[in-house]
């Protein structure tokens, strides 16, 4: 039986997938505001131990990047729904570990499980929507996907901050995490359909090694996108590791920290609905280069301005830069990949992108450690974004089918 592609033809299933990625983002939000501020207060991490503080994000990035590779390939063998279900199962222990963690090492363990969950689950919500969409809708579909995920992340960061004040940090993380993860598991089992049948199966899938090489270095267009994805995650690692500690040292209360970081996430999430659609109209390349530069500018402003509103504006500027980048880098990869190996190509791109968490956390941790100035981490990330933008501008090309017809 013929299956119809497009947002309107599949609005029900796309709606269910948007709820899924909202919950996936909320699970990520468990770790964004409260956990870094617990490091010195209750988990024995010494002040200015920037490398140790960043260790949990390094673990998250490495594990998630590997799981992206595995998820992409498994999705072409098992189907999207089964991989998504596996992702939720892997998340079940996270709230328990956070609630009873006796030391920082247990937080690293919880973040490792979070990396497994995110690599499996978020990848599948994205891949499944691309299965259902038309080529001219990819920017919009990915914008909606990332909007839901990062809005959920921001919302959870604010809720857990207030919950930590009212109930205690560990109790808030346990209650919120258990509810979100349990709901995600139930909804996946009951409502999500496998979308693999919507993908053309008459073409034989390319070998994994060939796709990995093509995305990573052989095709300069895809390689330019992969390096940009890797470096953009330096910003998110900075927001995750350094922003809460930096703002806490400036005297901000936990709810205020939650709002500043939440502004970054909300702007990132909401703006993607429009920036994804923008790339369907004007192409992917310009929004991607603009996003790198705007994001880096917001990072530098954080150490120049002062006050809750000013920090929120700077964080929001970085969030807008990420909104230009996030759906459109992925959409460009999807443009350049044939349907038969698109899932694997997106997995390889997401491998390099999320490896940026680990590399970025190490880099900003070393910058702060060697200089003994937390502000050095901001400079490191801003400069990295500028260099990556130049590489993307030089090696990257427009990929939207409306403007060009790339060889796939």
Image: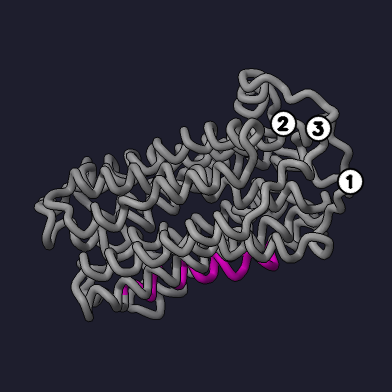
- Nearer to me, 384 or 84: 84
For the point 22% across and 81% down, the residue is 166
Q: Secondary structure at mark 2?
A: helix
Q: Is residue 195 left or right of residue 209?
A: right
Against 90, residue 269 (above or below) is below
- Residue 408 placement: quadrant: top right
Residue 341 circle label = 2
For the point 19% across and 61% down, the residue is 38
- Nearer to me, 9 or 48: 9
Q: In the displayed image of the protein, which residue is found farthest to the front?
A: 190
What colouring style does the render use? one colour
Residue 29 colored in magenta in the image: no
Q: Alpha-carbon distance for marks 1 and 3? A: 14 Å
Q: Which residue is mark 3?
A: 201
- Nearer to me, 181 or 357: 181
For the point 70% across and 67% down, the residue is 274
Q: Which residue is mark 1?
A: 1
Q: Alpha-carbon distance for marks 2 and 1? A: 23 Å
Point out residue 151 in the picture as x, y percentages from the top left corner: 52, 68
The answer to whether marks 3 and 2 mark residues whose Cβ atoms lie closer than 8 Å is no
* Residue extent of the magenta highlight: 257-275
Q: Secondary structure at mark 3?
A: loop
- Residue 344 placement: quadrant: top right
The answer to whether marks 2 and 1 mark residues whose Cβ atoms lie closer than 8 Å is no
Q: Say which label, 3 or 2, has the lower sequence index.
A: 3
Point out residue 257 in the picture as x, y percentages from the top left corner: 31, 72
Count the numbered circles shown. Answer: 3
Against 163, residue 98 (above or below) is above
């Amino acid at each position: 039986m013929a299956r119809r592609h497009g947002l309107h033809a599949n609005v029900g299933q796309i709606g269910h997938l948007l709820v899924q990625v909202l919950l996936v983002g909320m699970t990520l939000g468990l770790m964004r505001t409260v956990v870094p501020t617990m490091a010195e207060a209750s988990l024995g991490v010494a002040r200015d131990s920037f490398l140790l503080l960043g260790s949990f994000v390094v673990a998250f990035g490495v594990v998630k990047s590997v799981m992206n590779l595995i998820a992409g390939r498994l999705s072409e063998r098992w189907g999207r729904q089964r991989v998504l279900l596996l992702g939720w199962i892997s998340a079940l222990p996270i709230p328990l570990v956070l609630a009873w963690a006796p030391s920082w090492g247990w937080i690293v363990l919880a973040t490792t499980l979070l990396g497994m969950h995110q690599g499996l689950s978020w990848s599948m919500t994205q891949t499944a929507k691309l299965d259902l969409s038309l080529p001219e809708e990819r920017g919009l579909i990915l914008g909606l996907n990332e909007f839901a995920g990062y809005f959920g992340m921001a919302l959870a960061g604010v809720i857990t901050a207030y919950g930590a004040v009212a109930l205690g940090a560990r109790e808030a993380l346990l209650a919120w995490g258990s509810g979100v993860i349990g709901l995600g598991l139930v909804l996946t089992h009951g409502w999500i359909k496998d979308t693999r049948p919507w993908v053309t199966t008459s073409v034989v899938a390319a070998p994994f090694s060939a796709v990995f090489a093509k995305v990573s270095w052989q095709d300069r267009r895809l390689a330019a996108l992969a390096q940009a994805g890797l470096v953009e995650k330096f910003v998110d690692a900075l927001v995750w590791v350094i922003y809460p500690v930096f703002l806490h040292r400036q005297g901000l209360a936990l709810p205020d920290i939650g709002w500043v970081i939440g502004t970054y996430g909300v702007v990132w999430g909401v703006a993607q609905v429009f920036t994804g659609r923008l790339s369907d109209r004007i192409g992917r390349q310009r929004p991607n280069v603009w996003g790198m530069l705007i994001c880096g500018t917001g990072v530098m402003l954080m150490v120049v301005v002062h006050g809750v509103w000013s920090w929120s504006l700077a964080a929001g500027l970085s969030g807008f830069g990420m909104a230009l980048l996030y759906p459109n880098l992925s959409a460009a990869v999807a443009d350049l990949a044939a349907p038969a190996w698109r899932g694997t190509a997106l997995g390889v791109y997401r491998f390099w992108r999320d490896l940026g968490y680990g590399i970025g956390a190490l880099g900003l941790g070393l910058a702060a450690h060697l200089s003994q100035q937390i502000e050095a981490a901001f400079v490191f990330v801003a400069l990295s974004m500028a260099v990556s933008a130049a590489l993307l501008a030089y090696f990257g090309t427009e990929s939207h089918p409306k403007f060009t017809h790339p060889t796939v």
